[in-house]
Image (cartoon, rainbow, N blue to C red):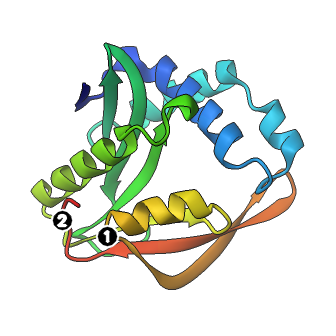
Amino acid sequence: MVRIRTMTEADVDTVAEIRVRGWQAAYAGLMPQAFLDAMSVTEEKARRRDIWQATRGHRINLVAEDEGRVAGWACYGPEREGPVGHGELYALYVRPSLIGTGIGRALCCAALVGAAECGYARMVLWVVKGNARARRFYERAGFAADGAEDAYDVGGTPVPEVRYVLEPVRAP
C-alpha cells in the first residue's frame, strides 16, 4: 500500500537517486544522451541537500512509500514567475520500475490537496514537450496545456517545454 508523507532530510539522498534515474528513463531521446549518461547520483545528493536547506519553508516536499521504501517524490509551492496565490508543481518523479503502479497518481493527488489547503487558486507545471507519457499523466489529472512554451539548455541543446495549468485547484 502506498503511503504519502512529508519528506524529511533523511530522504534527500533517496530522492536524489530517484530524480537522476527518473531523468535518465523519462528523457532518453528527448535530451542529449551524453548529458543523461553523465548525471551523477553523488553530485545530485549534494545538490539536493543544498536545495533542501535553501527552500525549507518555501516549498513542500512529499514522498511516497511503497512497502516501507521511498518510491517517489513530489515538490510544490508558489509559482516561480506568477502572481501571489498561484502554485506550481516543480517536480514529480517515481522510480522508473514503479511507473504505472499508481504511485505517481497518489503523489499528484496529495500535492493538489496540499496546494488547495495552501489556498492556491491555480497550479502550473512545465513538461518537456516531447514527453508524451508525462503529458497524458497530467491531462488525466485535470491539467491542460495553455499554449505557453519555453526552452532551457541541456548540454548545449535547447529542450522545449510546455506549460500546463489546473484551475481551480482540485484533486483528480
Image height of 150 relative to 153, above or below: below
Residue at (35, 41) in percent of width and height = 102
Residue at (68, 66) in percent of width and height = 130
Q: Around disc 2, counting alpha carbons within 10 Å, would you say few (fewer than 14), some (14 to 19), or many (20 or more)?
A: many
Residue at (44, 72) in percent of width and height = 164
- The residue labelled by disc 1 is 142
- The residue labelled by disc 2 is 170
Query: Judging from the image, what secondary structure is the residue with disc 1 in?
Result: loop
Q: Is residue 37 or residue 133 the one in the foreground?
A: 133
Q: Quadrant of the N terminus?
A: top left
Circles 2 and 1: CB atoms closer than 8 Å: yes
Residue at (32, 15) in percent of width and height = 67
Res 142 quadrant in image: bottom left
Q: Which residue is at the far bottom?
A: 147
Left or right relative to 92: residue 19: right
Mark sitting earlier along the chain (2/1): 1
Q: Is residue 104 or residue 151 the one in the foreground?
A: 104
The kind of residue on which mark 1 rests is: Gly
Residue 149: image x %, image y %? 60, 79
Q: Around disc 1, counting alpha carbons within 10 Å, would you say few (fewer than 14), some (14 to 19), or many (20 or more)?
A: some
Image height of 41 relative to 151, above or below: above
Q: Quadrant of the C terminus?
A: bottom left
| Number of numbered discs overlaid on the protein picture | 2
Residue 43: image x %, image y %? 68, 24
Residue 121: image x %, image y %? 19, 72
Residue 133: image x %, image y %? 56, 58
Left or right relative to 31: residue 163: left
